[in-house]
Image: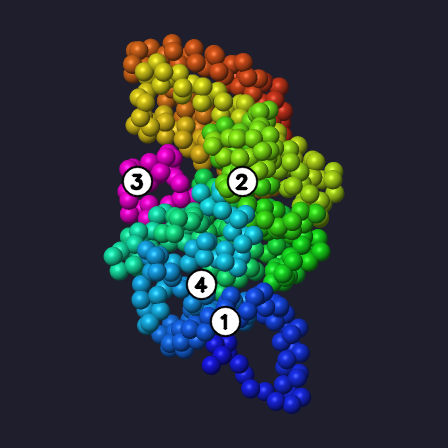
Amino acid sequence: MNQIRRYRVTGLWGLALSLLLLVVGGTASAERPAGVQGEDWGDPGGTKCVTCHRQTSPGLTEEWNNSMHGQRGVNCLDCHKAAEDDIDGFKHYGERISIIVTPKDCSTCHTTEFEQMDGSHHSHGGRILASLDNLLGEVVGGPAAVVVGCRQCHGGKVEIGEDGKPLPGSWPNTGIGRINPDGSEGACSACHGRHRFSKAQARTPDTCGKCHVGPDHPQIEVYNESKHGIIYRAKVDEMNLESDKWEAGIDYSAAPTCATCHMSRGGGEEPTHNVGDRISWNLRAPVSKKINLVKFDDGQEKTIPGGDAKLPEVGAEMDGRKVAEVLDWQTRRGKMQAVCTACHSEGMVVGFYKQFDDLVDLYNEKFAIPIKGIMGELKDEGYITAAPFDDKIEWTWWEIWHHEGRRARHGASMSGPDYAWWHGIYDVAKHTYMKFIPELKETVMKKDGNEQFADAMLEKYFRPIPGHAWYFEGMNPGMIEKIRKGYEKRYGKGSFSG
């Protein structure tokens, strides 16, 4: 019995329908995988799986049937069959299977994609045990919140019971950095929803928006506000999302998606499943730095921050491994800019990066570096404890860089003006002057009975920066008068209350 659904048609009607399906569903009739069906793929035993699951779970079976896998003859056992030594294997109607399909399983056919993903920042998303984010989740929040929150995006370790099945406390989980029983990291289904595994779905910004959303990483909101997002929504029917090649400027030109810029083919750049290859700034850290990338011969990689950092040579030993490739931040930026030029002029790209860099430098130099310096001295001098989150001022600094500062930087990186300013630098500035500085004085007063150390910190870290002059010396009277006249011209005499 053939597991792929067939419809009996004859004569000219059959020929017409076949031609129509060839045109409309071209990808479904694409060339089959290399190898021998029934040996390399298309396990004959999978026919029984399909017959049964059409009755017991028709929804997922229909999704599989309509997928590229289903139409090419890749069946349930090709993905779910388990070896005798797999700890997550168990007997199921005569076959030894595993519920979890890991990146290592997918690598049987998708070798290049696996190698690009393995070792990437995405695949390491589950390694958050040493982060402040994890401390907030596990301790300040609670483990149950981590399971349904943090780990559903970052991934977590899947625990296996004595019966070979995943324990409910750790499964289901499609986090991008899921730690699998076979030792692999990641989950292809984080982006390619099972059982359709659609490349079109994975290319949409909504797929990335499942995790890249919210107060500390609002990429989907920024994208939706940007001109790119606006045009994408209006012209989604022109995006040719099912295309095998999907090259920016050729297969589509209306607008990019997240995948366009970070993964897909365009501007002479080949596609990659390593989403970090084209990133030249770290926009997540308290202080942003240009980032270089070192790739090792075992497929792993390491980020080396700093625009002028000393980088190893290819072939050198580093951290006990051999360096296979070095991408400095200029090279990584060049990759992203190449994709931009598939649709934009060089002048547009250069101008965009100038504005982007200037915003990151503003955030760094005016706010992040001086506040980070003050926080270090407060800790060194015993005004706050070494433990995180037990002093009020630590929460304020956390939200300035982790929420507001990230929003500002990502807003600039993706052309989202409201996130660069009102949800970004405006909030950074407001909370610096109206929360952080008053809390700095309160913290010092509590220990010393005076504000001298706080004043000294502001003199050391803030006063030398021209952008803080207004705080120490007041607003420029000429500027205030100019604003008053503008208000009164627009709204009438006495309208300005500043």
- Does residue 413 show up? no
- As rendered, which of 244 and 340 lies closer to the eye? 244
Q: Amino acid at mark 4?
A: Cys
Residue at image position (61%, 46%) is 261
Q: Nearer the viewer, residue 412 or 263?
A: 263
**Disc 4, disc 2: CB below 8 Å?**
no
Which residue does the numbered mark 3 point to in the structure image? 138
Residue depicted at 46% across the width and 65% down the height = 78
Q: In what element is the residue under mark 4?
A: helix
Look at mark 4 in the image and give the residue it sits on.
79
Residue range in magenta is 125-153
Circles 3 and 2, Cβ within 8 Å, touching? The answer is no
Mark identifier at residue 38: 1
Tell me the CA gap for discs 3 and 2: 35 Å
Name the element at disc 3. Answer: helix
- Label 4, label 1: how many angstroms apart (C-alpha)? 13 Å
Residue at position x 33%, y 40% from top? 137
The answer to which of marks 4 and 3 sits earlier in the sequence is 4
Can you tell which of label 4 and label 2 is closer to the viewer? Answer: 2
Q: Is residue 394 left or right of residue 330?
A: left
Q: CA distance from mark 4 to mark 3?
A: 34 Å
Colouring used for the render: rainbow
Q: Which residue is mark 2?
A: 297
The amino acid type found where label 2 is placed reads: Asp
Residue 58 place in picture, x, y as percent: 41, 74
Instruction: Report, in whole angstroms, how far the alpha carbon at label 4 lies from the one at label 2.
Output: 27 Å
Q: Amino acid at mark 3?
A: Glu
Q: Residues within 10 Å of mark 2 (few under 14, many from 20)?
A: few
Q: Position of residue 124 (x, y in %)?
A: 44, 43
Q: Earlier in the sequence, mark 3 or mark 2?
A: 3
Farthest-out residue, left? 162
Going by the image, does 161 lie left or right of 152? left
